Image: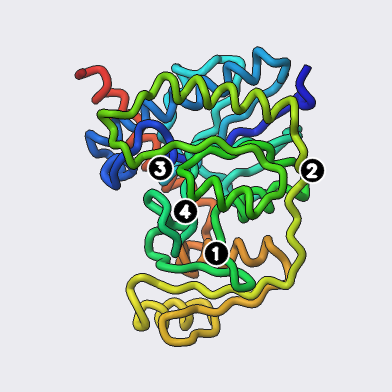
Amino acid sequence: MTMFDSVLIIADIEGSSGCWSYRASAFKTHEWVAACVDMTRDVAAVVHVLLDNGVQRVIVKDFHRTGFNLLPEMIDSRARVVQGYKVGPVPGIGDPGSAEAVIFLGMHAASGSNGFMAHTLTSRIRGLEVNGELLPEVYLFAGSVAPYGVRPIFFSGCPVACDQARDTISGIHTYSIDKSVGRQEFAVEPWRQGLARAATSALHDAQTVPFEPPGPFHTKVTLREGELAAQKLASRWGFHRQGADIILHNARLVDLYLDLIRICYLIPMAERVLPLAVAASNLRGRVGLAWLRRQIKKR
């Protein structure tokens, strides 16, 4: 039997079996339609194996762009699919509830690395280092749920992303997707079956603990737009700047994560009315999901 009664899945699109270009990750493109379908099939395969192996509660968090990329009707109805973003208590995710473990599906490598569509939070960031090391999203996401006792047990993405996950979290299981062969040559069904088998192994052989890296966190954020953009953002939020780099010093990981969210997504006015800003973003995502379903029906 599995070691866990309740599992959280955090799903992204770049490392899924359907995303092979930037347009497939973009919003409301025809390539995105196909990518969302395959992303959903990847998630559904893992949900199926979790439930078959004794997991009682599965929560799926759609965590790409608007947060409305998955098609819940294609996923076992016993799982709860959470779409859109929450203000807190965990940024974006909301309340992890009773989750004991977290599985990361379809992830990508960190900004500044050579993985497939590598970026951290946004492609506006060219490089992101914390205490001298590249900062992948799994560092932030696993760390954000650690205070709730949630253990990161499984990660899928490109080979570079998987290497970074193992370097970040000792003992995490990984399963890679090699996109160097191209979409037409890629055998999606055997890969997806392997993904499900790998997730099963993680359920029964988890060796991780909640990911709680010790502070302080000294972070360098290098913006792709250059020095003027860094100057504008540093002035907006009162951050220290060195050329095109914004320099952050945080004692706690949660404060680093919030500062990165400010840099990537917010302006001070939006932060002051954050619940309304999040609601507007989620409305945009719902409209996009309705468009996605109409495109699928036309096929």
Check disc 1: other Cα within 10 Å, few if <14, some if 14-19, many if 20+. Answer: many
Which residue is depicted at the point 67% across and 42% down?
172
**Which mark is on residue 7?**
none
x then y, percent, for residue 247: 55, 79
Answer whether labels 2 and 3 touch (C-beta < 8 Å): no
Of the residues shown, which amino acid type is indicated by label 1? Leu
x then y, percent, for residue 107: 49, 43
Which residue is depicted at the point 54% across and 35% down?
175
Of the residues shown, which amino acid type is indicated by label 3? Glu
**Mark 3 or mark 4, whichever is nearer to me:** 3
- In the figure, is residue 76 to the left or right of 21? right
Cα–Cα gap, marks 3 and 4: 25 Å
x then y, percent, for residue 86: 57, 45
User: How many numbered circles are shown?
Assistant: 4
Q: Quadrant of residue 202?
A: top right
Q: Is residue 97 visible?
A: yes
